[in-house]
Amino acid sequence: MDTVADKRVLVTGGARRVGAAICRRFAAAGAALIIHCHRSRAEAEALAAELPGTGHRVISADLADPGAAAALLAGLPEQPDYLINNASCYVREETPDFQAYCQQVNVHSPIRLIRDFAASGGMAAVNLLDQAVLRPVAANETFYLQSRRELAAATVSLALEFAPATRINGVAPGPVLPPAWLPGGTMAKTTATLPLRRPVGLEELAEAVFFMTVNPSITGAILPVDCGQHLIP
């Protein structure tokens, strides 16, 4: 396994929820975290202060801005050794205006980050996806799921393009944490239908991301961490 001790790990959307759990897992292994955020600067600073180890820093960028991804890595004094594309947009009600926004945040920015990251000598990148990318395309899929499928396809093609120097993988979660706007009980109804009958644990998902990052024999793979949701017809 690759070691992350004394390596730099960039986690986009790293201030809260899944991103924060991923930061904690890498910090526990001795990595220095570069915590990207958009509006959650205070939470990102608090997380950086609580993480074990030294060298953690916070950077802000709006990945809906077409130029933000290109500027993000260029503005760092030292390039990261590992990249975790965790930031994404997901809304309760999609509108036509949301499609372009979703494409930029969920597809174009992470792809640009991977390209610049690989060009700078980065070792491995992991894209956070969705278990739905491992299931057949449904009629009238949301813009969000369309964007997840595009990034999943790019994960495979970029892995071929940048091998052997840079490994690129994906992790496809099922239900982990409910969105803030989700009505009470809705997620419980979903998890009751899963083969494992429970939501995905935050630490379990972070551990899977860590594994796909450090295993030197895996590239171009998408790992479901979804309590079996992708198996449901």
Image (tube, helix red, strand yellow):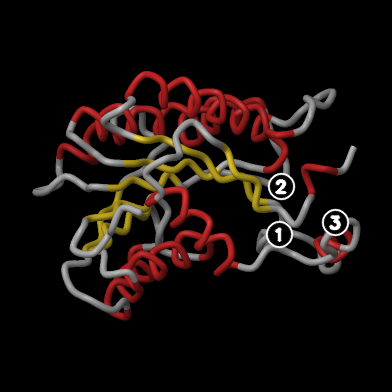
Residue at point 48%, 41% (across, down): 127
Crowding around mark 1 (Cα neighbors within 10 Å: few <14, some 14 to 19, many 20+) is few
Which residue position holds label 1?
181
Q: Position of residue 195 (x, y in %)?
A: 86, 56
Disc 1 vs disc 2: Cβ atoms closer than 8 Å? yes
Residue nearer the viewer, 123 or 58: 123
Q: Position of residue 42 (x, y in %)?
A: 34, 70
Q: Could you tell me which secondary element the residue under label 3 belongs to?
A: loop
Q: CA distance from mark 2 to mark 3?
A: 22 Å
Disc 2 vs disc 3: Cβ atoms closer than 8 Å? no
Report the disc number at residue 194: 3
Identity of the residue furthest to the left in this view:
77
Residue at point 37%, 44% (across, down): 216
Observer-side mark, 2 or 3, equals 3
Q: Could you tell me which secondary element the residue under label 2 belongs to?
A: loop
Q: Is residue 206 left or right of residue 49?
A: right
Q: CA distance from mark 1 to mark 2?
A: 7 Å
Q: Could you tell me which secondary element the residue under label 1 belongs to?
A: loop
Dot 2 amino acid type: Arg
